[in-house]
Each structure stands twice: as structure tokens, then as C-alpha cells.
Amino acid sequence: MTTSQEELLPGTRRALLHRIAVAQAEGRTPSLVAAVVRDGRAVWHGSRTSVDGHGPDENVQYRIGSITKTFTAVLVLRLRDEGLLDLGDALEKHLPGTGAGEATLAELLAHTAGLAAESPGPWWERSPGSLRPELTDVLGEQPFLHPGGRRFHYSNPGYTLLGALVEKLRGAVWEDVLRREVLEPLGLDSTSAQPRAPHAGGWAVHPWADVMLPEPTEDLGRMAPAGQLWSTTGDLAKFAAFLAKGDDRVLSAETVREMRTPAAPAEAADVVDGATYGLGLQVQSRDGRLLVGHSGSLPGFLANLTISVADDVAAVVLANCTSGPLLGSVGADLVRIVAEAEPRIPEPWRPLPEVDAAVLELAGPWYWGTHAFALRLTTEGGVSLDPLSGIGRRSGFRRNGDGTWTGLEGYFAGELLRAVRRPDGGVSHLDLGSFVFTRQPYDEGSPVPGGVDPEGWRGIG
């Protein structure tokens, strides 16, 4: 008897249920609901609640707070992919007169523009958006606290500016653009700017007594692109699958990969914590696993979305309390439980459908000085260059169609790789961003910079 790879094993399901049960009990939250995604679809839902017989399911809305920022980032990158803006553009170019126009769009997306973390005035999460009708009300008289591009400093007003940018270039309100360009194409029918039944109520739990207080639910107005949305574990499971693999109706796989790439300079504490930020996504290293996603909180609600692309596993966790359970830890644990209990089964090895003999000739060992590398052919005409020691500079390269390749990651990202041939057509060496790779260490028959000692290799004697 075999088990479908789409199903989780009973032991895995029990471990997941145990983890959220501990989180709900020790975190003292009225309810907690979670989902696990594998291979692009939800494979497990679970919930715990303080009210017998009323466990929430994957269709109950919770407020997701700053996970909203990831949705706003998707809208901005759609504009970029359409050629309507460049991430290096200053905000002033597209949205003049804000008083924060020197910030670039990339800096706003990565929280490196130097803007203040919060809006001045009353606590914006617990006060009506009508108190901040204009961007100047959101930013205040001194919007910048740090030089642009120098450090990561999380900024809710920064994403308010990005939402206003979307509205300016689309000629429609942020909520309508989001619904038309992201929610509807991805089938996120239970995600909305305003709560829709069935939805959870938000609560504050007393820190020293088992009693509760209802939290107000405010329309954030101008601040909506930073934290307004309500959603479900069912919808966020679909959104997690999109962030892992892309969907050409919304963003390509290449662009969502760009979102997941660190874009913010890490400070010392961030390096120790293994955490940084991409373009609308948090990035962290936890237990040797690279995780991306976002957390969210508003009075009465906590939310977390965690994805391990390498394991093809994601988790969504939502709770209706102001503080208590550490949902980032819960989400990471749900991913770990599935990834360790049921490791991803690799696709079968298959030979390439076709191969260019001129490229095949390049496969095998190469030397940069005395450092040994292996060049291998990959899919779609690409190649990879990896140190044989397992430690050092490595990269995959995409084919450019003219006999060259461009590096995709690490030290060689964006660098050009080309094979240099002799007059007789034979391969002399590889040139990679001016580095010369030869078939033998310091091959005297190749143009090694600085030349090769004519007496050759020798011992001590």
C-alpha cells in the first residue's frame, strides 16, 4: 500500500496539531488557525479555540496586518515589469510633492529609505484613518530619521507612499487595483480591505489574568497599503504558493525570486539573528533553513506567513489576540516539521532533450589559478560553475544566445562568462569578469595574467 505524496502522514499531522495546540494554550489566544502548503497546494489545516465547537476553518477571516505590505510590493513590481517605473527612480519622479521624494522606490520597498517607523499623532493602528487624510499627515514634519540606503529601518509610512504611488499610476484606489490585479487572478476571494463574515473578532488578553478586552477595528485610511487587509488561511496558502513559484498572470517566477532576495543592509544584530529584508518580504535563516515571508500584527490580531522554497513547504498561522503566541516561531516550526518528517522527493533525473556540442566541450574541470572548479551543463542551455572543494564562489549562468552566459547569483551575479577560442577553434580559456579559467592550473599555453614562470612547477631542492 502506498501513500499519496499530496497527503501528510498521520504522524506529521499530529505533530502539526500538537505545535499549534501548544501555541494556543501557552500564548493564551482566543483562537489560532494554521495551514501548511506543499507542492503549491494546502495539504493541512488545523485550529484551536477557547470556545468549544467553534473552531475556525480555512474560510474564517483574520486581520493580517503587515502581510498587506507584501501585496502592495507585488503591485509596485507589476508597474516595474510593465516599464512604467524603475526601482532606482526617486519617488518624486512619479509622485511629486510628498516631502519624501528623495527616497527611491527600491529603498521604500526594502525599508531602507530612512523614514520613521510610525506616523506621528495618535497610535494609528487604534485610531481612525480620517485623522490622517493626506500624505503629509502620515509623514509628519520630519519624515526622515536616517540617511537613505544606509540601514534597514522598518517604516509603515514608506508603504503608505508606495500605495499612493500605485493609485497615481493606475488612476484608481489601492484597494480596487489590488482586487483587479492580484486577488481576482490568484483566486483570493476571501481577502478584502474590510471584514466579511465569517471573521474573527480581535481581542486583547490581560497579561496577568485570563480575561479579555475587545480591540477596536479601525479603517486605516491612507495607511491601508501598510496593514489594512483581512484574509484566511485558505487564501494565504494560495498566496504562499504564488510567492514561491510565481504566476505569469500577476508576476513571473523571476520577479518573485527578486522579491525574496535580500535587498537591505544588515546591521550587526541582524547578522547574528540571521534576518534581513527583500522587496516586500522578510528573509531569515533559521535552523539552517532559508525562510521568506512576512509577519503582521494589529490590535487584536497576529499573522505569519513562512515559506521554505527549497523544501517546497509553507505555513500560515493566524490568531486573534494583540500579543501572546510568537507566530513567527510557530510558522517556522510547522515548516520544519513537514520538511524533516517528509523530505521533498526530488524529480527523477532525466537527460537533457538536446545539447550543443560546443557547450558540452566546456564541461568538466577548470582552474582559476590553483582553485579547482567544475563547469556543468544545466537546463535551457545554462551552465553552472562550482568550486570542487565545496567552498567558494559559485553561480549558475543563463544563456544569452550569443555564446555567452550571465551569472545569476553570488559574486558572479551579472558577470559575463565567455569561452575564448584559439584561431583553430579550440578552447583557450574561459573569461569570467576578467578572471581567466584554464584547463590546467596556470596553464602556460593560456594567457594567464602576469604570465607563468618558464621553469614551471617545482619542488624544494
Image: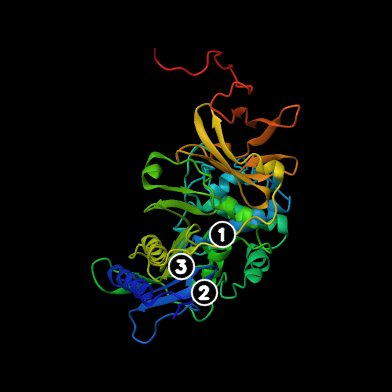
Classify 10 Å Cα crowding around label 1: few (below 14), some (14-19), many (20 and above).
few
x, y percent for residue 402: 75, 40
Residue 56 found in image quarter: bottom left
Front residue of 272/423: it is: 423
**In front of the other: label 3 or label 1?**
1
Q: Residue furthest front?
A: 461
Query: In whole angstroms, how far apart are the C-alphas of marks 3 and 2?
Result: 9 Å
**Can you identify the residue that label 1 sits on?**
349
**Can you identify the residue that label 2 sits on?**
234
- Residue sitting at x 33%, y 69%: 19
Classify 10 Å Cα crowding around label 2: few (below 14), some (14-19), many (20 and above).
many
**Can you identify the residue that label 3 sits on?**
316
The three-letter code of the residue at mark 2 reads Gly
SS under mark 1: loop
Classify 10 Å Cα crowding around label 3: few (below 14), some (14-19), many (20 and above).
many
x, y percent for residue 302: 41, 65
Front residue of 324/247: it is: 247
Sequence-wise, which precedes: disc 3 or disc 1? 3
168 relative to 229 in the view: left or right: right
